[in-house]
Amino acid sequence: MYRQAKWDEPLIFELSKPGRVGFSLPDPIEDIEVNIPEKLKRKKLELPELSEPEVVRHYTRLGEMNYGVDSGIYPLGSCTMKYNPKINEEIAGHPKVAFIHPYQDERTAQGALQIMWELEQWLKEITGMDRFTLQPAAGANGEFTGVMIIRAYHLDRGETQRNEMIVPDSAHGTNPASATMAGFKVIEIPSNEQGMVDLEALENAVGERTAGLMLTNPNTLGIFEEDILEIAKIVHKAGGLLYYDGANLNGILGKVRPGDMGFDVVHVNLHKTFSTPHGGGGPGAGPVGVKDFLKDFLPVPVVEYDEENNRYYLNYDLPKSIGKVKEFYGNFAVLVKALTYLKIMGKSGLKAVSEIAVLNANYLTQKLKGTKGYELPNKELRKHEVVFSAEPMKKETGVKALDVAKRLLDHGLHAPTIYFPLIVHEALMIEPTETVTKEDLDYYVEVLKKISEEAYSNPEVVKSAPHNTAVRRVDDVLAAKRPVITWRMYKQLKEKGEIDI
Amino acid sequence: MGKQYLPNLAHVNEMLKEIGFNSIDELFSDVPKEVMHEFNLPEGKSEYDVFLEMNQILDKNKTVLEMPSFLGAGTYFHYIPAHVKYLIERSEFLTSYTPYQAEISQGMLQALFEYQSLIAELVGLEIVNASMYDWGTALGEAALMAARVTKKNKFVVPKHLSPEKRRVLETYVAGAGMEIVYVDWNEKGQLDLEKLKESVENAAGVYIEMPNFFGLIEENIVEVGEIAHDNKALFVVGVDPTILGIVEAPGELGADVVIGEAAFFGNPMNFGGPRAGIFATRNDRKLIRQMPGRIIGMTKDADGKRAFVMTLQTREQHIRRAKATSNICSNEALVAVAAAIHLASLGPQGLKKLGEIILKNTAYFKKRISEVAELPFDGINFKDVLVQFEVPYDVIHERLLEKNIHGGYYIKPHFPELGESALFAVTETTRKEWIEKLIVALKEIIAEAEL
């Protein structure tokens, strides 16, 4: 039975003891007096005061109340929570990475530029695109980059009326949000009963205002869009471009490439497909690749290689560039990790990744299928992930997808993504990835079956889960109704007697 | 080829058989055959081979530890205490996802709540999000937020803005069709108030930095805020948070929104990334509703015990989709936690001392550099100093590099009106002998040029 640490760990502010020191700083070069104008002088600074061992213990305890890929299976759908090889961290932690300034003369940063250039070559071949920018910090930042490139392309051709971006109803929320940020009107199209893009709806949606279509393939149901070549034809014929959301690239690595399927712009998530850790929400990296005809619109700078002089350099000379989407060249340390991974995996390794990821997802699908309370909507053959619906369970027992998720935690198993995609009611979106064992999968299915039994025999135990985690079910309604965002707000409420935690 | 990461490679046939498939190919029968593609990539290598190869590539970099460097302009060499890296590499933090399942992710949630709380104390505002990608994208988001809050379309910024931030800002607001107005600096290298007044009419927001791009402390920050508020514009302050032990919290100086770079604490330079953007606002529902990014809140669990959870999510893309306040999903959580650990270790005394050391070192640098060059602006500098030469700076740069010194950031390509100028920066890490070496070298170079 799983038991997470349950420390009653105070906030770091509550651990403060006046006079304790947790820092050591060098002396100033010379003790020159510099006077900040009185009106700008710092008056009050209420930071905690702790010694270094106390700081270390505090964060160690917090770590013990957290669950990562290294703790166990973490099958969050669309998040590709695979094992993060430790060699990645070792290389990225090298002083030759840490102590490099982004404005250093290129001659003193050839290693950094070579890493970026090499990574681009790998990504080009993996996706079938012609050029990449490594600047975007995350998937959504990449999407924004991609749709801005599409916008710039149409404007450059004088097609100013192309202001509509088509997005399927199964898309990640970031797709419509990114399109809106780039100034597009979002046109949502429905999926068919198979869980794929409805071609007729697409035909009806495209026209002279169409800027493009944003598509995830395999889609968020884990289903490969079989009609992808037809989809590409429809969009291109209407004058639009095809954007590939790379969140699910793990399911097709070494089999088929976005570039060959007709996509014009692609983003990949290095923190999903290429094994860089998610860090509790970031840093990620979302490089964007384009076909040759779009390369002039990429953000600046791009990395070039002068073969003759064996020299890497940054090229800012792209007059049609969309500009910059992030400072400097992206999350460089993350790029280092991804390249390390790619070099270890190589051609056959990457192909094995998608094969095993897809095998694992289908194995879980078939093993769980038919369990009372869970339904498998849409077609059966999945790629890297599967979406079950707990709708029957909810109707028959009142136990919701949320409750199933919480009960999984009690067994030391991370929950799937829930309530997404929006087109499946009570969705449980499971992506095991290629790095779990057969026993992990068998146990996951076993626990999901056990939860089903509990739901029909003793639903309360599921509805009141979790029981074995650091805290019990969290009241998120209260959190939104009476926001306490910082220690400062907490203290104000405490003084007024409006809070008792 | 990475077999060590793929346990089920040993069970492929067994698993296929169990679920009624004959081959792996059958699992991919839905992929159109005509576009299937065999990768033209090198084969994988052993961990040792890759370890050596990556080390050889990295060896071509020259770090600031191998060559005194005076680069700043938005990225600075600070020393990060060893325990910070040690703690954020704990794999429960490092390998976790965004804390969607709060009950099993309390550690990360509390660490991020504490990050928000520490930043709130620094900047003097109650509401802080769990990070943006960096300062530059935080600026872009602040401009978009100001437009949503005020329903106006113009954002006023200093002309003395880093080229990085300027280009990020312009890209971020292009889709919304916002107008960015650049206000000139005065003879002191600070925002010109008269010119600001001429530009501020109908502005959604006014932006100023402390210190500014030239490293100068803007003296009229309160007045700039008043001008913004008189015109019903939001007052947005960008701050290098390492100054906040010695300079007043922007929230106390009238800021409605504070942005900045959290990665100056706890994180090495890493060739420019990852970093983490600070984003804070006043405790005002109208502002909170329009705020971008994830926010962690304190609440209770079923037993009434204190607990933490992601909150106010109806602003976000996964719920609001096309109507979200921003498209941001992944942020820079671990970078923010590193910053928090460093800040908590510094405490009030450490932060004040850090600020004072930097201030003194910058003053010492100014004293020495003025032996060989001009300082166009008179004021109080923090880290960056604008230095003007009579010799073309690219020549100076070249000669310095030959002497194994990295000079400053050449800003003529971005601000031609400043002539042969470069931004030189120092921090608490700068050594006296580095400055000595620089001054000796500059004297030589200038003397040579005069011959």
Image: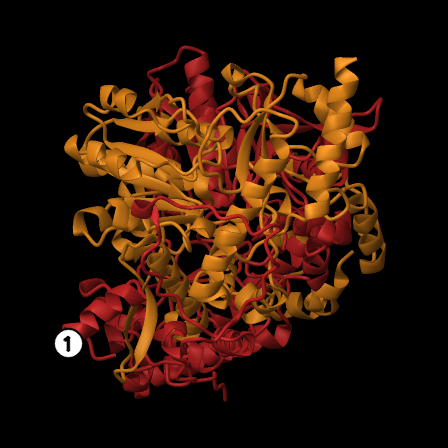
Chain colours: A red, B orange
Say which quarter of the image contains residue A148.
top left
The three-letter amino acid code for the residue at tag 1 is Gly
Label 1 sits on residue: A497
The front one of A342 and A336 is: A336
On the rendered structure, is A219 left or right of B120?
A: right
Q: For the point 80% across and 59% down, which residue is it? A: B47
Percent from the top left, x then y, of residue A431?
51, 61
Residue at disc 1, secondary structure: loop
Residue B384 % position (x, y): 53, 37
Which residue: 15% across, 74% down?
A498
Q: Where, by quadrant of the figure, is residue A206 drawn?
A: top left
x%, y% of residue A383? Answer: 55, 54
Residue at position x 63%, y 49% in the image:
A333
Q: Nearer the viewer, residue A445 or A3?
A: A3
In the image: residue B107, left or right of residue A501: right
Left/right placement of residue A306 relative to residue A491 reads right
Residue A231 shown left or right of residue B320 in the figure: right
